[in-house]
Image (cartoon, rainbow, N blue to C red):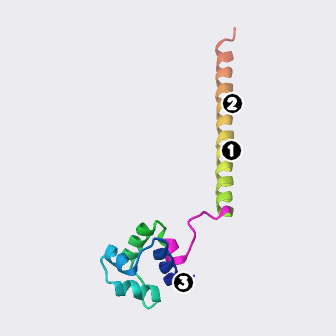
Amino acid sequence: MELYERLIELRKRENLSQEKLAEILNISRQAVSKWESGASSPDINNIVQLGKIYNVSTDYILLGKSQEIDSSEHSDHVIEKQVRKSKFQVSGFIWLGLSVLTILVLYFITNLP
């Protein structure tokens, strides 16, 4: 789906006329018409405003990218986080063990007859 097609779809989904959208954005209706015909594209400020009006990301407006995280990327991220957490826990247990061992050695050295 092209940018102009997403702009039409989003405007219609919100039940806005080109006239009303133009009024909200403080631009001419002809500008909206040009965007939706593919003759021109909205500038970055209007893209940001459209995202707010339609409650979608600018990535969706510009590229058609879904706002959902790709499940494989999400899974990889979760696994990586769990691995880091496990390494941290193992490291913590090693330090705890060394600390207890050091205290025991010092205790026995100081209590020798």
Verify whether residue 48 appears in magenta. no
Mark 3 highlights which residue? Answer: 2
Assign the C terminus to one quadrant of the image. top right
- The magenta segment is 59-71
Left or right placement of residue 85 versus residue 46 in this view: right
Q: CA distance from mark 1 to mark 3?
A: 45 Å
Left or right placement of residue 82 versus residue 19 in this view: right
Residue furthest to the top: 113
The mark that comes first in sequence, 3 or 2, is: 3
Mark 1 highlights which residue? Answer: 86
Q: Nearer the viewer, residue 50 or 71?
A: 50
Assign the N terminus to one quadrant of the image. bottom right
Instruction: Indicate the amino acid at tag 3.
Output: Glu
Circle 1/circle 3 CB separation < 8 Å: no
Q: Secondary structure at mark 2?
A: helix
Residue furthest to the bottom: 39
Left or right placement of residue 13 versus residue 45 in this view: right
Answer few, some or many: residues within 10 Å of disc 3's Cα (few below 14, many 20 plus, some between 14 and 19): few
Answer few, some or many: residues within 10 Å of disc 1's Cα (few below 14, many 20 plus, some between 14 and 19): few
Mark 2 highlights which residue? Answer: 97
Instruction: Indicate the amino acid at tag 1.
Output: Ser
Answer few, some or many: residues within 10 Å of disc 2's Cα (few below 14, many 20 plus, some between 14 and 19): few
Q: Position of residue 5 (x, y in %)?
A: 52, 82
Q: Position of residue 60 (x, y in %)?
A: 52, 72
Instruction: Indicate the amino acid at tag 2.
Output: Gly
